[in-house]
Image (tube, rainbow, N blue to C red):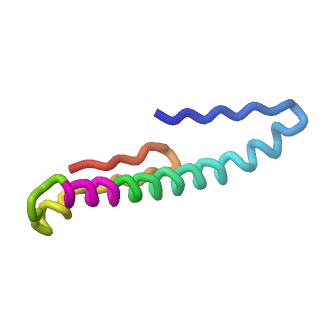
Amino acid sequence: MLELTITADAVNLRSLDKQEGNARFAAAIALTRTAKLARGAVVDEMKTVFDRPTRYTLNSTYVLRAMIVDLRAEVGF
């Protein structure tokens, strides 16, 4: 699990509140792109492990993208 902690002093607290939405948006995009790369790696590995895998088998993986309210992406079968 990836955990992100942000600390700031009282002077920068107002600017941090304004940037929180942008940080969550950027984190959601980064998590989704990472999950898509992981899906590609899984498909590549399936091509080497299985003997003549069908398109149905290779396309059986999916990615649930991360949302701003739920910073979690998932790769599954």
Where in the figure is residue 18, as x and y percent of width and height? 75, 49
In this rendered view, identify the residue nearer to me: 61 or 54: 54
Residue 47 is left or right of residue 17, and the answer is left
Residue 28 is left or right of residue 16, and the answer is left
Where in the figure is residue 41, as x and y percent of width and height? 34, 56
In this rendered view, identify the residue nearer to me: 20 or 64: 64
Report how many numbered discs are placed on residues in the image: 0
* Identity of the residue drawn at 32% across and 49% down: 75
Where in the figure is residue 71, as x and y percent of width and height? 49, 44
Up-down: is 33 above or below 54? Answer: above
* Identity of the residue drawn at 58% across and 54% down: 25
* Identity of the residue drawn at 82% across and 37% down: 13
* Identity of the residue drawn at 66% across and 53% down: 22
Residue 14 is left or right of residue 22, and the answer is right
Up-down: is 17 above or below 54? Answer: above
Decide whether residue 41 is among the magenta residues.
Answer: yes
Q: Residue furthest bottom?
A: 55
Decide whether residue 44 is among the magenta residues.
Answer: yes
Prevailing SS of the magenta stretch: helix
Where in the figure is residue 60, as x and y percent of width and height? 18, 58
Up-down: is 24 above or below 62? Answer: above
Report the span colored magenta: 39-48
